[in-house]
Image (cartoon, helix red, strand yellow):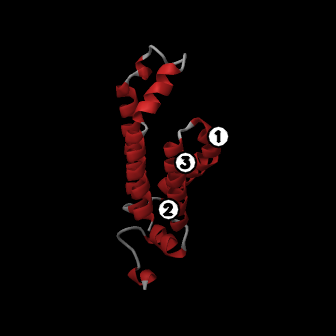
Amino acid sequence: MFDRLFLGSTALGLLNTAISFDSTMELIQSDPATAGTSMAGPGFVIASAAVGVAISLLLWFLVARKASNVAKWILTVLTVLGAAMLPFSLGTLGLVTAIFSSILTVMQLAGIYFLFRPDAKAWFDHGPDGMDTTVFD
């Protein structure tokens, strides 16, 4: 379930980025701190999204395929921090983006929940190669 929820939220996040691209560009270009800088261009927004997705996929790989406890905790902390910041950003987002962001956050929190279940604990304790397959029976 972690894989489905996390990868689904990543895909939904990419869709959200594509849908809100124009409004994001307007927001960046209207901010006096970024207007006229290299951060005001579409390349910056695309690169930022690509780096974010790359980090997410790296953490997913380390958690889901390599049973890394360190990556699990990094992902957990980042997800909880993101969820804590969501209420503060909802007022600045458009309706569709706010709905997407809320759904993404719920999906990510649900995915994190599955990392702390007893079967996941066995996964992290034994690793991908030494997994006791009876844990799923």
Marks 2 & 3, CB-CB < 8 Å contact = no
Which percent across, then down, holds residue 43?
A: 34, 27
Q: Nearer the viewer, mark 3 or mark 1?
A: 1
Q: Is residue 35 above or below residue 19?
A: above
Lower position in the chain sequence, tag 1 or tag 2: 1
Residue at image point 53% right, 39% down = 94
Marking on residue 88? 1
Amino acid residing under circle 2 = Gly
Mark 2, Cα crowd under 10 Å, few <14 / some 14-19 / many 20+, is: many
Q: Nearer the viewer, residue 20 or 51?
A: 20
What whole-number distance in Å separates the C-alpha atoms at marks 1 and 2? 22 Å
Q: What is the secondary structure assignment of the residue under circle 2?
A: helix
Q: What is the secondary structure assignment of the residue under circle 1?
A: helix
What whole-number distance in Å separates the C-alpha atoms at marks 3 and 1? 16 Å
- Residue position for label 2: 111
Residue at image point 43% right, 86% down = 137
Amino acid residing under circle 1 = Phe
Which percent across, then down, holds residue 6?
A: 44, 58
Which percent across, then down, holds residue 38?
A: 41, 18
Q: Nearer the viewer, mark 2 or mark 3?
A: 2
Which percent across, then down, holds residue 70?
A: 50, 54
Lower position in the chain sequence, tag 3 or tag 1: 3
Q: Nearer the viewer, residue 27 or 2?
A: 27
Q: Nearer the viewer, residue 66 or 46?
A: 46
Q: Is residue 68 above or below residue 132?
A: above
- Residue position for label 3: 78
Lower position in the chain sequence, tag 2 or tag 3: 3
Does residue 16 appear in this view?
yes
Amino acid residing under circle 3 = Leu
